[in-house]
Image (cartoon, coloured by chain):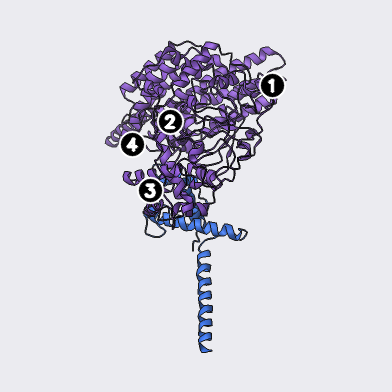
Amino acid sequence: MKTFLVILILSAVVFCLSFTFRHKKEYTSLYNTTLEDFKRDQSQLYDFIKNADLGNGADREKIKKRIHDSRLKLKSLDFWLRYLEPIAYRRINGPLPVEWETEVFEKFEPPYYRGGGGLMLAELSLEEDPFNKSALLTLMDSSLTGIKTFEADSITTQLNSFDHFFLANRLYILNLAALYTTGFECPDTSNIIRELRSMMKDIRKVYSNFNVEFPATPLTADYLTLYNNAVEFVEGQSLQFSLFDHFTFIRDFVNPLFGMNQQFINTYNVQSINFNDYSLENSVNSIFDKRLYNSQNTKGIFSFVEDEKVLAEIKRIGKLLFYDPILSGNNKRSCASCHKPTEFFTDTTQATSPHFDHQQKLARNTPTLVNSIFNHLIMQDGKHISLQGQARDVITNPDEMNGVEKDLVKKVMSCKEYKDAFKKFLKYTPEEKEVSLSHISAALTLYYADFSNYHAPFDDAMHHKTSLTPEVKHGFNLFMSKAQCGTCHFVPQFNGIKPPYISSEFEVLGVPADTGFTKLSSDHGRYSVHPASEMMNAFRTGTVRNAPFTKPYMHNGVFNTLEEVIDFYDMGGGVGKKLSVPNQTLASDSLKLTVEEKANLIAFIHSLNENVIFEAPPSGLPSSSNKSLNGRKVGGEY
Amino acid sequence: MKLIVTILTLVMLSIIFHQCVTQKKATAYDIPDHVTAANRQAFIEKCEKGKVLYKIHCSGCHGIYSKGKDGVPNFTKIQIDSYHAAALIGIDPKNHAVAKKMSSEQVDQVITFLRLRKID
């Protein structure tokens, strides 16, 4: 009898425990059921398309409606899928059929092929004429394959600890600012805000279930209240995405949520095992802090130097070298010849700079160095993975500075001031036996990198430190919606790097050779570095920051004013101007911007002018033991 | 006459000795035969730089030249064969604060050193 009782009590305890255990698994089971539901939906959609008679428009409309419903289901999973496996996510909802990517930690590898498929491309394919059913089925099949990835143990085991949650949440918040409100991968613009609403509401459930399963590391009440306010704000907004108040949404909700989530990451000591977090900095509390992500090592070979005094000394030498024509083959051209350090490190007077021989012109416009450190790939064709590699290339390029490494190191070391300094710096690079071009290029990048650390009125407004005029705010809202700028120039750097900020993007715009649009620019761009057909005439997306100071525009400097640039986009790029650009990635139909809208866009672009404090040029250059070198002009000439 | 013989012998010996030394340096790394002489030299230089960086910044934990730390890879032949830059700086960025600090050229030097190093 007694044993029976004990067994009874024990089994009762076990029963209760198993119950509470099941109860506590609410978060992981939400993932599993939502994914299961979506999977079922996708295979039903596949069958529906397979059996539908697509000869008539009515059935196409039905499919379109079904795709829209599926997208809402996907959005409730977006939080997890985008973070846990972004490559598989592209099979479910990819923006392009083929993408070539070089991620930051794979810089030494050739670009990777990334196939896209799924809902966005399926929806776009419905517009095609003649309609291709098998292509549509292939796209849907891609989605089904993509979903399988998310059932794998390697993915689902991550859900058992709280770490991934705060990191996925960070990416979700960053995407709220940069992607979800711009229609980046939602072809039907009338659905953008509808999807945003639905997704934000569904994530509330993810949040509350997380707090049940991980009570020791919860989202705080403050966070949840602010999030609910954000949901309410979006509910109160127009469904027309061009009327959506992107500015207030980011300033009052998204950015503060980001700051709170960063605090969770720090206080809960969250650990990452995911490459999505590689570039992001845990110590910043605002998306508009310039340290948000790391893309370039500006120290180069001096990477282990921490002493501020030594760094300042390297920068001082870097500044002298930047202005010193000693780095060129004929001792006449310096970095400052084209990158004028008092004018945003660019040259506003020339479309492209003179060739070294002064007979021809270079192929590309001189880009500003301000904010160049926020790119993963350098140069407009992404040829270089580091700023130091870029400096080395320009210095030794026969068309540009025409220097020879051995000679110019010798010339530099013939100047006592340089020699003393570099002998001292050599101590910090034990792997190098003697001073080399690597030391020189690292000094140059350390010098100019500091000029990228300034903020613009727009950043200040995001931090409630200043207010912007209604025109500027309207301009930003247009930038993020109707004008379709924000789908390539991403928040917060407004360059081609989107969350999680691990790779640089390239676009094909169809930039003409001349303002008469007689022919396409003959520059092959990215194709010359990576010969894939998609990359023909593709160029790395530049930043919009400081644009009013960095004319002329585009890779070849063909446009002289911001108005011309906006008109070019408004007309649908090269295709819109009747040029043949089969792989253009820019929408080729008109944006239909009004005169007032264009003016507001430009007003917004002006709010991204940074308060950079430039330094006066050095008063002189170090003197050399070789007398013939001592006539060098500070800053050189062209 | 004797003097000339001595000098000649010494010269011969030094040439042989020099050859031995360079030979030894070249065989410290596994560089495929088809690599040209100039590239071979560039690889060796890169490896030598990587080796210096490795000894200073990595070997405290990854024991090739020291005991290292328990549970941290020591880069045996099998480990290194399946190795990749991503493994060093991508997979676990927090644990690889050192690697993250390095410039991409320095990472390249260390990886090249690890890939080409002869392991007995």
The image shows residue B99, relative to residue B116, as above or below, that is above
N-terminal of the pair, mark 4 or mark 1, is 4
The amino acid type, in three-letter code, at marker 1 is Lys
Distance between the alpha carbons at the discs numbered 2 and 3: 31 Å
N-terminal of the pair, mark 2 or mark 3, is 2
The amino acid type, in three-letter code, at marker 2 is Ala
Q: Name the image quarter holding residue A4.
A: top left
| Nearer the observer, A404 or A438 | A404
The residue under label 1 is A578
Q: Residue at x 44, y 58 (%)?
A: A433
Q: State the mark number for residue A168.
A: 2
Binning the other alpha carbons within 10 Å of mark 2 as few (below 14), some (14 to 19) or many (20 upward) gives: many
Q: Are marks 1 and 2 in contact (CB under 8 Å)?
A: no
| Nearer the observer, A545 or B117 | A545
Q: Residue A278 location, x and y as percent? A: 44, 38
Distance between the alpha carbons at the discs numbered 4 and 1: 56 Å
The residue under label 4 is A269
Chain that appears blue: B
The image shows residue A66, relative to residue A512, as above or below, that is above
- Circle nearer the viewer, 4 or 1: 1
Chain that appears purple: A
Distance between the alpha carbons at the discs numbered 2 and 4: 15 Å
Subunit of label 4 = A
Q: Can you say which quadrant of the picture contains the C terminus of chain A? A: top right
Mark yes or no: residue A138 visible: yes
